[in-house]
Image (cartoon, rainbow, N blue to C red):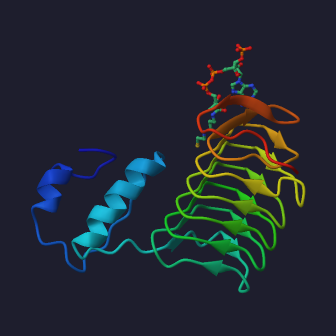
Amino acid sequence: MDHGYKILGSFEDLFSQDITGKLFLLTMGDMRIRKDLTDRIYSRGGIIPTLIHPTARVSKFAHVSQNGVLIAPNCIVQADVTIADGVVMRDQALICHTTNIESFVFIGPQALVGALLNIKEFVFIGQKSLLISKKAKIIGPNSIVGAGSVVTKSFESGTTVIGNPAKLLETKGTSTEVNP
Ligand SMILES: CC(C)(COP(=O)(O)OP(=O)(O)OC[C@H]1O[C@@H](n2cnc3c(N)ncnc32)[C@H](O)[C@@H]1OP(=O)(O)O)[C@@H](O)C(=O)NCCC(=O)NCCS
């Protein structure tokens, strides 16, 4: 048992069954694992619906993918925001207007993602971080924004940034900071 729910079996048990048309909720924070499982579920005909908590406020002018997005309690999504497949927004996160969130981005609790930004796929935005409108224009794919960071400019792929103002902690890709 886990939190009162009976554990029915492993993933292998699951994928040995016919899951056509069955609904799934994925709760893990590791977005690579989430993506792998998503692919496996879709390829076998399963469905991962987008779930938006009733206390979240999502503008009718926002565009939220119907595939596997999770928007937790008290989040706010403003107008002209685009949210792609598999994005997770944890509690009280806020995305300001005209910002584009690519697939499998994780946005931690109470993070504030400013307006007119472009957050590329698999970016991890730590809890209570602040990405300043217009200034943090592009956060490159697979980058990590440390908890509580204040991001005042763009960063390219595979970077981890921390602090106020956010500075590079390490670079996993070949690229470094890009022009703000
Ligand atoms: C940025 C982060 C990924 C770095 O983790 P890490 O690679 O294990 O790095 P370390 O913990 O070894 O820290 C390296 C250095 O950066 C500092 N540091 C780490 N995270 C920091 C942060 N968010 N802000 C400021 N400094 C930070 C550490 O103090 C350490 O400094 P030192 O070398 O002077 O001692 C992690 O600290 C973090 O912020 N994760 C986000 C967690 C989160 O928001 N989760 C959401 C869950 S719902």
- One can see residue 8 in this view: no
Q: Residue furthest bottom?
A: 60
156, 1: nearer the viewer: 156
Count of marks overlaid on the render: 0
Image vertical order of residue 60 relative to residue 43, above or below: below
In terms of image quadrants, where is residue 87? Answer: bottom right
Image vertical order of residue 15 relative to residue 168, above or below: below
Is 131 placed left or right of 77 in the picture?
right
Give the quadrant of the N terminus.
Answer: top left
Q: Residue furthest front?
A: 174
In terms of image quadrants, where is residue 80? Answer: bottom right
Is 54 placed left or right of 36 in the picture?
right
Q: Ligand 1 falls in which quarter?
A: top right
Is 40 placed left or right of 65 in the picture?
left
**Whole-percent x and y of residue 149?**
79, 38
**Residue at the image position 73 percent from the left and 74 percent from the top:** 81
**Whole-percent x and y of residue 44?**
21, 71
**Whole-percent x and y of residue 143?**
63, 44
In terms of image quadrants, where is residue 23? Answer: bottom left
**Residue at the image position 70 percent from the left and 56 percent from the top:** 92
**Residue at the image position 15 percent from the left and 52 percent from the top:** 12
**Residue at the image position 51 percent from the left and 68 percent from the top:** 69
109, 85: nearer the viewer: 85
**Whole-percent x and y of residue 9?**
15, 50
- One can see residue 18 in this view: yes
Image vertical order of residue 49 relative to residue 105, above or below: below
